Amino acid sequence: MFKSSKYVVLDSKNNVYVAVGLFMLAIVIGVLMFSKNMMGDDRAIMGENNDSKIIMPMVEIETHGFMWNQSENLGELRLTETKSNPKSEYDISYIVYDEAGNELPMKVIKGSYQKEHEDDIETKQEIYIDFGLYDEFYYITVEIRQKDSTSEKIVMDYRNFEQKAIKEKGDNYILNLEAEQAVLKELESDLIPYQEAIQAQNEKLEQIDALTPDEKEKRVGEVEKIRSEIEKIQKEMAPRQEKVNAQQKKINEMREK
């Protein structure tokens, strides 16, 4: 029979061995590729000063997490600066760059200096750092600098970013958020008299509940009046509670952006 020279003849043992060897090699390569895809990126996870406190002269910086909107190529780091003196000359500046040392476009959004309590010496300032990203990166470094050349680094590996549909924020974003939080605080203060009144009525119920069964039986009518009073207070409080809930929802939605 005619045999074309364009085809490999597998009649000989050598050709069979070659074919089997190629087949086995293909299997090994396939397994390695599959294992690589299943295992994901095996590079070391880069991270330095993540979710921790960074102590610098006159300033303490606490990181709260970092987010990544992959579809928008937008990253965000949220942190808090705590200072013993907000007018200190040890001001902080930030620089963001990728693993190759290329600076990335960024914006620092600052809130106001606030005290948790009136008699506190320390003041806290909430800060967001928004920065541009690209499709594939390994890690991002945020360098924190002070005027005396002191510096610290926050290194964020792409595998540790929280995937979130964040948007680019305006310069007054945190200030506007603080204003809404002040409104919430006022609304919550309106609830206090009602909450205290309900607590007082519940304490009366607890006192009666601690009595003997015979004594409790004699005060059934009083219990009904107390419960009726609680319902009355709750109805009066309901519109104010709705305002609090609506304001809290508004703040939550602002924070999600």
Image (cartoon, helix red, strand yellow):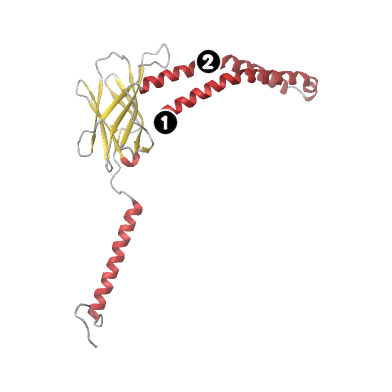
**Picture quadrant of residue 147:** top left
Query: Which mark is first along the chain, 2 or 1?
Result: 2
Residue 208, image x, y percentages: 72, 20
Whether residue 184 is situated above or below residue 28 in the rendered picture? above
Q: Residue furthest top?
A: 119
**184 or 63: nearer the viewer:** 184
Q: Secondary structure at mark 2?
A: helix
Q: Residue at x 71, y 18 (%)?
A: 226
Name the mark nearer the viewer: 1 or 2: 1
Which part of the image, by quadrant, shows the C terminus?
top left
**Where does label 1 land, which residue?**
256
**Picture quadrant of residue 88:** top left
Q: CA distance from mark 1 to mark 2?
A: 25 Å
The label shown at residue 157 is none
Residue type for callout 1: Glu
**Where does label 2 land, which residue?**
189
**82 or 192: nearer the viewer:** 192
Residue 119, image x, y percentages: 41, 11
Q: Residue at x 28, y 13 (%)?
A: 87
Residue type for callout 2: Ser
Q: Secondary structure at mark 1?
A: helix
Residue 91, image x, y percentages: 25, 19
**Picture quadrant of residue 173:** top left
Q: Is residue 169 left or right of residue 236?
A: left
Q: Residue at x 31, y 15 (%)?
A: 86
Task: Check disc 1: other Cα within 10 Å, few if <14, some if 14-19, many if 20+.
Answer: few
